[in-house]
Image: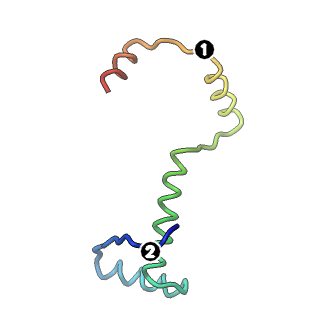
Amino acid sequence: MSGKAERLHLRMDAEQKALLEAASAAAGASVAAFVLAAATAAAADVLAARHSFVLHQQAWREFDEALARPARDVVGLRELLVQS
């Protein structure tokens, strides 16, 4: 990442602040570094979950078979997609 020029301001209650301060102290990091690392990791996890998924062997076979079947028209789908 490049130099840090952006800011993010947060409002929280006293309990949340105390929790973040205690956790960052336990991790040996500043509150800002701790929050940024935790938020960045959580954001990466959320986005990764949208790009990949894990299937058991039987579910994978069924998924793979469905992908291998020829495409077919679904009544109303073309119109729905054109309206979007």
Residue displayed at 37% across by 70% down: 6
Q: Residues within 10 Å of mark 2 (few under 14, many from 20)?
A: some
Q: Secondary structure at mark 2?
A: helix
58 over 66 or under it: above or below: below
| Relative depth, front residue between 18 and 41 | 41
Q: Is residue 64 left or right of residue 11?
A: right
Coloring scheme used: rainbow
62 over 34 or under it: above or below: above
Residue 83's tag is none
| Relative depth, front residue between 3 and 34 | 3
Q: Secondary structure at mark 1?
A: loop
* Residue on which the image places disc 2: 35
Residue displayed at 41% across by 81% down: 19
Residue displayed at 49% across by 87% down: 25
Say which amino acid is labelled 1: Pro
Percent across and percent down for residue 76 are: 37, 14
- Distance between mark 1 and mark 2 Cα atoms: 48 Å
* Residue on which the image places disc 1: 70
67 over 28 or under it: above or below: above
**Quadrant placement of the C terminus:** top left
Percent across and percent down for residue 65 are: 66, 23
Mark 1 or mark 2, earlier in chain? 2
Say which amino acid is labelled 2: Val
